[in-house]
Image (cartoon, rainbow, N blue to C red):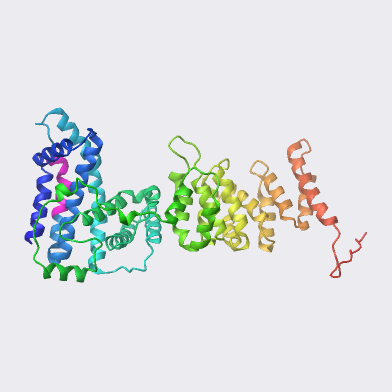
């Protein structure tokens, strides 16, 4: 395993105190303007590239040693804080090393599981060119939010294997990765490592072909990774297309989507669902850094409604349950549920009558009252009205019954009015408005099948 050993040795040397100082000095000397964060980023990139290349070389060329090499790289990353304790060096060097450990060292530690998961999937071939990267990332984010790290990593491994073999990770995931961000950074670093590798051509071919290539040629060693990482790798794999531009518009600052965006929605259809649903559900997108309301989830909701995406209902219900009713996203979620109509009604009714708390159930009553007529909805609304007190929101339910428009609710509302303390003028007004609205519906003449007006019974 001499080739892999050479790369491992270079990794250990660059990560040693002397290697840190020399590499950072070389990087600084090649900078037009000194910037400590840029320098640390470049040094981190060198270590990331070397570390992943060591793992990749073992996966391709020495699969029997892969676990051993994995342990060596893991030990190296874990030992960085001890290796780079540079108290004997000048203060500026100590400060630089401490800053690297806070940022780049942590980045390496967090990216490592994604690298191992990726290479396990790549080596096993347990992925398909038909896999949907957006769906896998959306599922991985969901699993990570639930605390299922192993399940999330399994999907990240498939995404990484696809990325190594030439599939794109859309740039929008850099904004909506959430808990996946460290692993996603690791996947970007892995692709950069392959793009800069002097013995491997990006994109990778299936593992069997890569091993045949490795055994068929006489490899010329040129340990130039340190130099090569000072130059940007090709980023053809990140070129934007119309879908990327659509996601940029959704994430951007516009209040409403453009006609061009709706054209993309209609053309792409359900392919957009994983990203749009992630944007809508991403808590970090609900407010920007200044605490101002962020409109990206609202714009994503517009697109989901245009797609008639009933898959969005669970996310919308969660928004109604979690978001402040004064936020634009709350109203947009209610409106989206109404527009989804009868397709969404069963889930809304089930949630409202089941796990939703009393306040959320009342807000969902407003949604149900504006959907198509359904006997289950009527029973739910009347049941809610009976058991809800005025301070909990009985007035809102009175309006919901009026909006629903079933005149069978009139006796219930009139009985509530009779039993109401007339000093409660606001509640009395709400009930009278609801009764008046339903009474006008009851008095409205109906048309016979032939179009003649039916005579109202006295």
Q: Which residues are magenta?
A: 72-84
* Residue reaching furthest to the front: 32
Report whether 268 appears left or right of 10.
right
Where does residue 116 sit, x and y in percent of width and height? 23, 58
> Residue at the spot x=13%, y=58% of the render?
69
Q: Is residue 78 magenta?
A: yes
Where does residue 389 sit, x and y in percent of width and height? 67, 45
Where does residue 205 sit, x and y in percent of width and height? 24, 67
Viewer-side residue, 385 vs 406: 406
Classify 319 as above or below 424: below
> Residue at the spot x=24%, y=60% of the render?
202
Which secondary structure dominates the residues rendered in magenta? helix
Viewer-side residue, 161 vs 352: 161
Where does residue 54 sit, x and y in percent of width and height? 15, 56
> Residue at the spot x=68%, y=46% of the render?
396
Instruction: Name the image quarter holding residue 72.
Output: bottom left
Report whether 271 appears left or right of 442.
left
């Amino acid at each position: 395993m001499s080739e892999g050993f050479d790369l491992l040795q270079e990794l250990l040397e660059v990560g040693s105190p002397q290697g840190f100082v020399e590499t950072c000095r070389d990087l600084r000397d090649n900078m037009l303007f000194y910037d400590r964060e840029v320098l640390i980023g470049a040094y981190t990139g060198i270590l990331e590239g070397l570390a992943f290349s060591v793992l990749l070389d073992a996966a391709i060329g020495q699969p029997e040693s892969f676990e051993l090499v994995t342990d060596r790289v893991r030990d190296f990353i874990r030992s960085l804080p001890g290796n780079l304790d540079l108290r004997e060096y000048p203060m500026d060097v100590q400060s630089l090393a401490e800053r690297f450990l806070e940022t780049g060292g942590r980045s390496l530690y967090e990216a490592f599981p994604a690298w191992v998961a990726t290479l396990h999937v790549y080596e096993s071939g347990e992925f398909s060119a038909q896999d949907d990267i957006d769906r896998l990332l959306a599922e991985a984010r969901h699993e990570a939010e639930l605390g299922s790290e192993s399940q999330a990593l399994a999907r990240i491994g498939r995404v990484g294997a696809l990325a190594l073999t030439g599939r794109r990770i859309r740039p929008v995931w850099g904004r909506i990765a959430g808990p996946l961000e460290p692993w996603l950074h690791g996947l970007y670093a892995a692709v950069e490592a392959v793009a800069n590798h002097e013995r491997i051509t990006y994109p990778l071919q299936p593992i069997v072909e890569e091993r045949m290539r490795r055994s068929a040629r006489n490899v010329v060693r040129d340990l130039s990774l340190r130099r090569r990482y000072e130059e940007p790798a090709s980023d053809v794999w990140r070129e934007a297309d119309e879908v990327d531009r659509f996601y940029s518009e959704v994430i951007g600052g516009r209040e409403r989507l453009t006609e061009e965006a709706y054209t993309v929605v209609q053309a792409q259809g359900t392919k957009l669902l994983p990203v749009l649903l992630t944007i809508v559900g991403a808590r970090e997108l609900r407010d920007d850094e200044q605490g101002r309301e962020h409109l990206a989830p609202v714009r994503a909701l517009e697109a989901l409604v245009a797609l008639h995406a009933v898959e969005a209902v669970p996310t919308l219900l969660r928004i109604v349950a979690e978001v402040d009713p004064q936020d634009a996203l709350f109203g947009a979620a209610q409106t989206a549920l109404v527009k989804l109509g009868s397709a969404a009604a069963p889930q809304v009714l089930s949630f409202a009558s089941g796990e939703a708390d009393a306040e959320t159930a009342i807000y969902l009553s407003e949604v149900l009252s504006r959907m198509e007529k359904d006997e289950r909805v009527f029973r739910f609304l009347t049941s809610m009205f009976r058991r809800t007190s005025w301070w909990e929101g009985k007035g809102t339910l009175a309006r919901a019954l009026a909006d629903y428009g079933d005149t069978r609710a009139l006796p219930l509302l009139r009985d509530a009015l009779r039993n109401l303390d007339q000093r409660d003028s606001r509640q009395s007004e709400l009930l009278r408005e609801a009764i008046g609205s339903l009474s006008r519906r009851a008095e409205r003449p109906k048309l016979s099948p032939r179009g003649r007006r039916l005579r109202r019974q006295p």
